[in-house]
Image (cartoon, coloured by chain):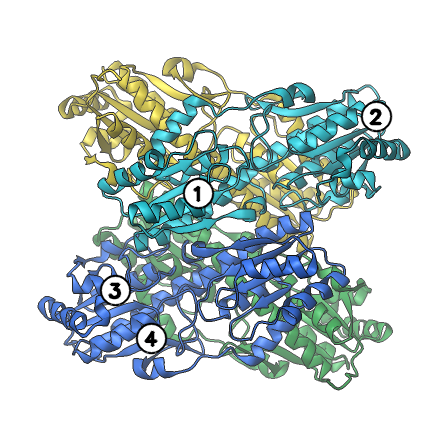
Chain colours: A cyan, B blue, C yellow, D green
Amino acid sequence: MAESAVKRIGVLTSGGDAPGMNAAVRSVVRSALDRGIECIGIRRGWSGLINGDFYRMDSGSVSRIINRGGTILYTARSEEFRTAEGQAKAAGVCKLLGLDGIVAIGGDGTFRGAQELSKCGVSVVGIPGTIDNDIVCTEYTIGFDTAANTAVECIDKLRDTMQSHERCAVVEVMGRHAGYLALYVGVAVGATAVLVPERPYDFHSQVAEKIRHARLNGKTNFMIVVAEGAASAVDVGRQIQEELALDPRVTILGHIQRGGSPTAKDRVMATRMGYEAVQILAEGKTNRVICTKDDQIIDLDIDEGLAMKKTLNSEEFKVMTVMTGM
Amino acid sequence: MAESAVKRIGVLTSGGDAPGMNAAVRSVVRSALDRGIECIGIRRGWSGLINGDFYRMDSGSVSRIINRGGTILYTARSEEFRTAEGQAKAAGVCKLLGLDGIVAIGGDGTFRGAQELSKCGVSVVGIPGTIDNDIVCTEYTIGFDTAANTAVECIDKLRDTMQSHERCAVVEVMGRHAGYLALYVGVAVGATAVLVPERPYDFHSQVAEKIRHARLNGKTNFMIVVAEGAASAVDVGRQIQEELALDPRVTILGHIQRGGSPTAKDRVMATRMGYEAVQILAEGKTNRVICTKDDQIIDLDIDEGLAMKKTLNSEEFKVMTVMTGM
Amino acid sequence: MAESAVKRIGVLTSGGDAPGMNAAVRSVVRSALDRGIECIGIRRGWSGLINGDFYRMDSGSVSRIINRGGTILYTARSEEFRTAEGQAKAAGVCKLLGLDGIVAIGGDGTFRGAQELSKCGVSVVGIPGTIDNDIVCTEYTIGFDTAANTAVECIDKLRDTMQSHERCAVVEVMGRHAGYLALYVGVAVGATAVLVPERPYDFHSQVAEKIRHARLNGKTNFMIVVAEGAASAVDVGRQIQEELALDPRVTILGHIQRGGSPTAKDRVMATRMGYEAVQILAEGKTNRVICTKDDQIIDLDIDEGLAMKKTLNSEEFKVMTVMTGM
Amino acid sequence: MAESAVKRIGVLTSGGDAPGMNAAVRSVVRSALDRGIECIGIRRGWSGLINGDFYRMDSGSVSRIINRGGTILYTARSEEFRTAEGQAKAAGVCKLLGLDGIVAIGGDGTFRGAQELSKCGVSVVGIPGTIDNDIVCTEYTIGFDTAANTAVECIDKLRDTMQSHERCAVVEVMGRHAGYLALYVGVAVGATAVLVPERPYDFHSQVAEKIRHARLNGKTNFMIVVAEGAASAVDVGRQIQEELALDPRVTILGHIQRGGSPTAKDRVMATRMGYEAVQILAEGKTNRVICTKDDQIIDLDIDEGLAMKKTLNSEEFKVMTVMTGM
């Protein structure tokens, strides 16, 4: 392959962490080394870039992390990086260190930072890493599969005790403003009902009638999955108690969903995306985001990517709704 | 072996469910059949006994349940059974069905019921099944090991994300009035601090100083495990925020800890206890509870058993406290 | 929706079982009932159809199975069904029972049976269920994701002890004539080398040099993943011993990979495919197979589907090979 | 507490690794530091001691390892240490480094080494770490619980597919010359039969009749658990095929059982034992082994401990045998 002009790159993780980020970091580092590119790990995201919080990484730096949750590079949110001063400072650090590019792993907040840094003349490529799968331009984001399986395993356990006691459970799962994780999990556990932010919440039709329908069909335990962006599980539980005379148990899965050893899929996707990100940088591109489309890895302009509008696939939503109602 | 006078027994699960109850039911049924004793499954605990909610069980009734959480016999709490009328009604059902004895699987509430029924002339043997491990007369209760491992797995995941973000987590685990589960889990996850109901709660010495000590030793993430009987995790979280200027994440594990496929230990203990319970009944004993002592299965008089007073082993507590503080 | 002419359908699982088959059966049954279509469960695949081994299924028949491995309908291979007499007999049973269609869940052997039965005038729709992901016309087959995760979890454990002892492991994974599962798993565990049947086996370049390369880079433990169709793990182990003077540990994962509670993805895919299969039958189509393409559920003519030729995506293969070599 | 004369100790892991060894190392290091004792990690067991393969450990050296399988100190077997020269060399290294004692974590081979080193004037305390639970003087050895759960989880998966296909499985589990692990696992999975080295192997009574009995009771799938010390699973499988006309599937779990994140019990026991070992050394004792008796941590003279003779508890064995036959 023709010698790349790119000699040294940085890699960082930013925003909320997600299982598989370590696998992505490992892939970036080793793909770079494989091309003779030096790799600098930047700790604590954009904030660490501004503060010069970095170290040189070699192949051993990323040994034994492909199966570990969290991120060895740490992550943080940075107010300072949202200001022009902060961005200029970060660009200055890149110049000082002689970084020919940066791979930034995170969610849409991370990508907005990448856009700004690109404008300052630094080549940046983003890799989508967030359990919420709420990034508009990519079908898949690293961490989603692990988070879904974690939620499913927890709810399987809950269901055991709900069946024994013939009770109703209300479970709140993550997803920020998106209902995709909740819907996916709801289908996988055979939920009685799923509440998502993409549909206006109506207790009567979406909860009460579904519970009644299930009860009339002979069921004596019920599982209501609530996306955090749709409603408060505590409130839904209270309403069930008041209007249906049940005594539901409410669980908020919380940050458990953000950790854990990544699934096979998250490790494979992270590995493929990391490889692609280095390739894009080596080709001299900037302001790109790595995406999946039809199970292929592609790259898009970040501006275009962030401008897209994500919607729940309505065909899929219909099928899922029918199935959770069963 | 000499022909037993016992021809037909009942089995029920009562109180809060626990992983391994199904393995115990299976063992009771198959141990009885192996001795030529007929076995009647009573659904929904004492309440089901009063209401005649039962069915005849054969070997196939308990196929494929050794690895399933919850209880196929369902469980419930019964106000009526606390009254003399309820108990007389239950004893009447036993007479009607010709039950020569009952195996009751549950916690101390279940055993108090067993005492009352024994007084009404029904042979009863109890098997301790509760995740809290809070029954005074036995070293082990079915479900504890599974609940501990579930909590540990969840907290391992939490730790991943707490490390990435350099945060403090506060986790509330079950255990009712006992701190044993919390202490065990706290040691297993290497918690920064563990709060148990057996020790008066002092924020300064038990939380603040432990976090400070860890921070001064270079740690940037902290895990505080709170027994539900010791304090409210939400309150502890608020205090940490106010007095230590950290922004902790609070998780209440809740009913997740009550479900799930039982661990090897819970299956083996349940199997051994179920076998012993049938043997005790076949020997014509009543008002007994199956216990473990020094890893052996023994049986005690329920009255004696319930009169004992459980305390945290103070040597063990000291060791554990030293280790969690590290 | 317009009243469907389809009043009664059968559902069966055939060939090797795969996790998620139960979720597919559940979805078929409940999707049918939702449309007012009666559903007959046929046990033991084509063999059971010939022998009239069936029962009427209602909503409760498929309760609590979405999370269970295996198939409640059992599965078997049938020599008789490969003969014209067997197929005629099976078609006769369909006529006798008044089945307007059959959903057959399985691999390519199952689909060849479906083709034959279609020719006998019975409407058949296939759902791809096999851990091997070796069905030419669909990107995804039910069971692959669970099998991949099972293999990854086992190999993660193996790696722990290989690291402690600084040893070489050789692991044989399933996949029949296809290397996709092995390659996927190999990437996910960070294997030193992966052997697949799609590439001619050369010990020197594919194993010896990769191990040497890793050793020279400082690694002291090695993980070689072998697809069952590529070579015998025992032979590879022997060759490593002879030619590299290492003392490798050989593990054949075997049938473990075929069981276990299905992952979130397998449950969701099975649910969506089951729904679609019933819809296709209700529309009066026959000889179709449900497929995924670009993460959408579509249907193809079985003849066309079986005529396709699957190859490892060579771009993907290259990326994966680079990564496993690291 | 009175100032201890012990100022610096070493810690090593030796023999086959076991999950929980890392938790024990962590506990030794932190318990020592807590007493103001310096801690030296010796890599690769007795072999590493001879070769001076060591490093100084601080609190951070054992961060984040409580939940990791394997051993960060590596392990190896050493021929040289079995010779008087090797032992003298090792004692010399202890003198050179000024080690006032050594904690050796491993199995009975490790303890025989500890005996020899004690005779050379070095204070040594052993901690039992082996998945086989075959050390005569202690009820529990670190790693057993994790290995048992790993085997149970694998066999649960196997059972899924054996049920679907109505097949017989033969599974070989570890345990060296002891049948305890196999018996425990066999009870936990509801095995049809369990073969242990403590009982002479008789195919007819222990396998054939048990399978026939189960088949006559309506079962169509069978699970035979074979301890590696009792027979070869491959041979048992062949005999089943020849004499019972079944087509069994044979699985050898192998080294998978040696890895994986330790269970709650293994972490807690390892932590308690590590603490105790340091205390014993600080008290100036030598040639001791940490044991559990009646769930308490005690210490014994190694010579006495190794002289004991372990037998399967025959009451327990009877119960277990009855249950696996069901």
> In percent of the image, x 62 and y 21: which residue is there?
C314
Q: Could you tell me which chain the residue with mark 3 belongs to? A: B
CB atoms at circles 3 and 1 under 8 Å apart? Answer: no
Give the quadrant of residue C235.
top right
Q: Which residue is mark 2?
A: A6
Q: Are marks 3 and 2 on the same chain?
A: no
Q: Could you tell me which chain the residue with mark 4 belongs to? A: B
- Disc 1 crowd, CA 10 A, few/some/many (<14, 14-19, 20+): many
- Residue furthest right as drawn: A96
The residue type indicated by label 2 comes to Val
Q: Could you tell me which chain the residue with mark 2 belongs to? A: A
Q: Secondary structure at mark 4?
A: strand
Residue C255 disc label: 1
CB atoms at circles 4 and 2 under 8 Å apart? Answer: no
Which of the two marks, 3 or 1, is nearer to us in this view? 3
Q: Earlier in the sequence, mark 3 or mark 4?
A: 3
The x and y percentages for residue D7 are: 80, 77
Front residue of B72/A173: it is A173
Q: Secondary structure at mark 2?
A: loop
Residue B290 disc label: 4
Q: Are marks 1 and 2 on the same chain?
A: no
Q: Secondary structure at mark 1?
A: helix
Front residue of C299/A168: it is A168
Q: Quadrant of the C terminus of chain B?
A: bottom right
| Vertical comparison of C162 with B322: above or below | above
Front residue of B139/B45: it is B45
The residue type indicated by label 4 comes to Ile
CB atoms at circles 1 and 4 under 8 Å apart? Answer: no
The x and y percentages for residue B89 are: 14, 69
- Disc 4 crowd, CA 10 A, few/some/many (<14, 14-19, 20+): many
